Amino acid sequence: MWLHSNRVVEWLDILPIGDPIANIVEPEEFTPVLSDCREELVDISASFNCAQAYFDAGWQHSMKQTYLRSGIAQRLHNVNASLPDGLSIFVFDGWRPLALQSELFEAAYGDANLPPGFLAEPSKEITLPSPHVSGGTVDLTLSYQDTPLALGTSFDNFDKDAAIMAFEETDSIVRRLRRLLYSSMRRQEFIVYSGEWWHFEYGTPRWAAISGLPGCYQIAEFPDGHYGGNEVPQGDSP
């Protein structure tokens, strides 16, 4: 959803200018997470407005539910409570099983024109999981009266305007909304990815490398390995 032009003045009156977004210097190496805090994966679908973009698109290893570590879910509740009336967060994506991360990566980088960095390479190293595979990474936006807002670009749009700093030079509704989302998430200790305004992490190897603090999330899995996705049945057809 794009904010309608006849509401520009109203939104500029309501939204604070906000503090500038800090420039993120991406680390050359991530910091291994040596110990997992053992927070469970929880389904947040009943607590937040969530998209099922990958599930609806039929990705084989996607799922209808949206899972995150329990501590991440609590931090998002705190973010929601801090937002102005009428605004709330809308979650695009959370935890990904390793199989889904592999599926997305292989499909994306079949396009030789896509620059590196937009999708993390799948990692089976338990101390260095891909961000979404840890359960400590969430893709999200702000919503107004439960309608998600496109803050300068759509989700998973990989052009230059997706960068968190893309709209910082000139005051606009997009800049104010991005600053609001960024500052609300920073107060809960999340770190944004410089190339994607919607991507925030806590407790991951990348988060540890940038913050200088120990990470707490290794690879996250369900004990039985089952998560109710679009899996293709194995074996003979009935």
Image (spheres, rainbow, N blue to C red):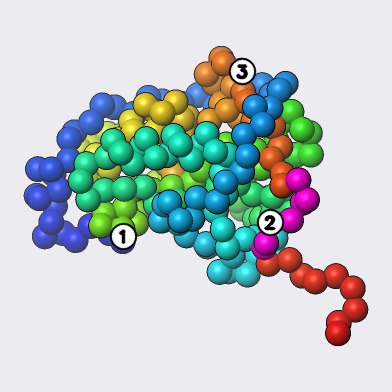
| Nearer-N-terminus badge (3/2) | 3
| Nearer-N-terminus badge (1/2) | 1
The residue labelled by disc 1 is 147
SS for tag 3?
loop
The numbered dot on residue 214 is 3
Q: Nearer the viewer, residue 206 or 187?
A: 187
Residue type at mark 3?
Pro
Left or right relative to 51: residue 228? right
Q: Residue at x 37, y 26 (%)?
A: 187
SS for tag 2?
loop
Q: Are marks 3 and 1 in contact (CB under 8 Å)?
A: no
- Tell me the mark number nearer the camera, choosing from 3 and 2: 2
Crowding around mark 3 (Cα neighbors within 10 Å: few <14, some 14 to 19, many 20+) is some
Q: Residue at x 20, y 38 (%)?
A: 171
Residue type at mark 1?
Thr
Q: Is residue 57 magenta?
A: no
Crowding around mark 2 (Cα neighbors within 10 Å: few <14, some 14 to 19, many 20+) is some
The image quarter in which residue 204 lies:
top right
Q: Image quadrant for the N terminus?
A: bottom left
Q: Nearer the viewer, residue 86 or 107?
A: 86
Q: Residue at x 34, y 33 (%)?
A: 184
Q: Position of residue 202 (x, y in %)?
A: 53, 30
Residue type at mark 2?
Tyr
Residue 149 higher or lower than 135, as above or below: below
> Which residue of the protein is positioned furthest toward the right in this rendering?
236
Residue 206 higher or lower than 180, as above or below: above
Residue segment shown in magenta = 223-229
The residue labelled by disc 2 is 227
Q: Position of residue 189 (x, y in %)?
A: 44, 26
